[in-house]
Image (cartoon, rainbow, N blue to C red):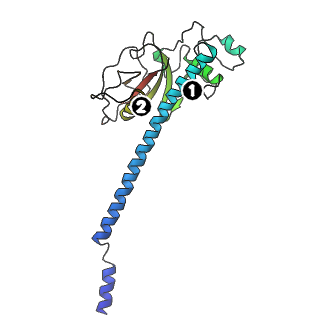
Amino acid sequence: MNNLRNRIASRQSGFTLVEIAIVLVIIGLLLVGVLQGQEMIENTKVKSVVSDMKAVQAAYNGYVDRYKTVPGDELPATYTARGWATTVGGNANGILLAPVAATFTNAAGENQAFWQSLRASGFLSGNVTDVLVAALPKHSLNGSIGVAVGAPTVYGLPGTFVCASNLTTKQAAAVDATIDGPMAADNVGNSRGNVRGATGAANLAPVAGVPADLAYNETVTVTTWTLCMRIG
């Protein structure tokens, strides 16, 4: 009888140290797998943002090659003659009027016609007649994509730019490095190369001046970035 009690007690004594160690190892492996999976998802989203920006660049250049003018600048009558259901147009002066202040509001200038003409021509997908914020493409990191033209510059560079808003520091660093290549030793990329950017509000509009050098400090998690890439 005593032997039976002893066997029952031994079975109810709980896990052994070896069993606990095995469980902890399994939990650790699961956590590592989850973290690695999250990083892979994040990297995929970053690559998607870069692809979105380059898709706008390809659409812009394709439009210029086909129609020999910049998208968004042509007269509304020209769009109508092509049979496009656009609602806005430009002044046909050969210059896209897309003020930096309207990059993510899409509220003024020819930037509305820019998105409409790229969609009507088939270079980008989306609703042709959308205007204002509704017309702006959304990227996979919870931000918007807008267009800006330097008057005279965007972040210190002349030309036409596609911009992505609402990026974390880590995301901004990855986008910058993917497009412009490795950072210098000081980890500053926002004021150098064809990708420029600054920090501020969630949908921070770019400015004309060269941004101050700012290292991509990934431990600062509350910072929100806007990055712009020159496309023409």
**Residue 180, position as x, y percentages in the image:** 40, 26
Q: Give the alpha-carbon distance from disc 1 to disc 2, as whole Å.
A: 28 Å
Q: Are marks 1 and 2 in contact (CB under 8 Å)?
A: no
Q: Name the amino acid type tagged 2.
A: Thr
Q: Residues within 10 Å of mark 2 (few under 14, many from 20)?
A: few
Q: In the image, what residue occupies the spot 33% across and 29% down?
A: 183
Q: In front here: 58 or 7? A: 58
Task: Give residue 157's quadrant in the image.
Answer: top left
> Mark on residue 178?
2
Residue 22 visible at all: yes
- How many tags in the picture? 2
Give the residue drawn at x 55%, y 17%.
111
Secondary structure of the residue carrying tag 2 is helix
Q: Local crowd at mark 1 within 10 Å, few (<14), some, or many (≥20)? A: few
Question: Percent x, y for residue 127?
Answer: 63, 27
- Left or right of 162? Residue 92 is right
Work out which residue is located at the far bottom of the displayed protein and give it: 1
Q: Residue at x 34, y 80 (%)?
A: 11
Residue 10, x across and y down, in percent: 30, 81
Q: Nearer the viewer, mark 1 or mark 2?
A: 2
Q: Residue furthest top?
A: 93
- The three-letter amino acid code for the residue at tag 1 is Ala
Residue 139 percent across, percent down from the top left: 50, 32
Which circle marks residue 134 in the picture? 1
Front residue of this view, candidates 116 and 200 = 116
